[in-house]
Image: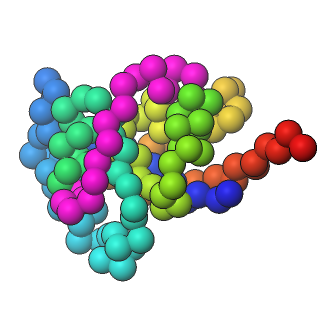
Amino acid sequence: MNKSLYCIRRAHAFNNKITNKGYGQIYDFRKKWSKNKEKEIELVISELNEPSYDTAKYLFHNLPIITLENYYFKNINTFYSFLRKRDESVITFVGDQINIRNIKCTDPNSIQDINIKHCYPYLIELSFKDICDN
């Protein structure tokens, strides 16, 4: 089973509110993101914090948004298990830099070297293998 996951770092925020700079990032994303691409997205997942949720809501107006608590990201396999159980095959995740780094990298030594841009889509192709007990 294959899934496409777009990881998008939330817009710039201060005191848990999106800033003018953040709204500019959202505007730039919406201007560049093709309407055809948006039609492919079946589900948007957001972290359970105001800047991430608001970014998801402003980026993807008409799509369903699920918010996830942080325990899904403490052990990244929990997040992958959640994705595996979902029926959707094209999913977007909006969250903070740390969780996107964890999703993008399997090598913990390389995590610090990645610069994750605000409101920029990073495509990750996931392949899940079904386990059979036969």
Place of residue 39 in the rendered image (x, y in percent of width and height, measured from the top left)? 35, 73
The residue range painted magenta reads 59-76
Q: Residue at x 34, y 70 (%)?
A: 38
- Would residue 68 be visible to someone looking at this image? yes
Is residue 124 left or right of 25 when viewed as pictured? Answer: right
Is residue 64 part of the magenta span, yes or no?
A: yes
> Against 43, is 102 above or below?
above
Q: Residue at x 36, y 79 (%)?
A: 36
Place of residue 116 in the rendered image (x, y in percent of width and height, measured from the top left)? 45, 43
- Would residue 122 be visible to someone looking at this image? no
Total number of numbered discs in the rendering: 0
Q: Which quadrant of the rendered structure holds the C terminus?
A: top right
Q: Quadrant of residue 109?
A: top right
Q: Nearer the viewer, residue 33 or 39?
A: 39
> Against 14, is 104 above or below?
below
Q: In the displayed image of the protein, which residue is found farthest to the left?
A: 20
Place of residue 103 in the rendered image (x, y in percent of width and height, measured from the top left)? 56, 38
Color encoding of the figure:
rainbow
Place of residue 106 in the rendered image (x, y in percent of width and height, measured from the top left)? 68, 35
Q: Residue at x 40, y 23 (%)?
A: 70
> Against 69, is 39 above or below?
below
Is residue 128 part of the magenta span, yes or no?
A: no
Q: Residue at x 28, y 53 (%)?
A: 64
Q: In the displayed image of the protein, which residue is found farthest to the front?
A: 134
Is residue 72 left or right of 78 when viewed as pictured? Answer: left
Q: Which quadrant of the rendered structure holds the N terminus?
A: bottom right
Q: In the displayed image of the protein, which residue is found farthest to the bottom?
A: 36
Is residue 22 left or right of 121 when viewed as pictured? Answer: left
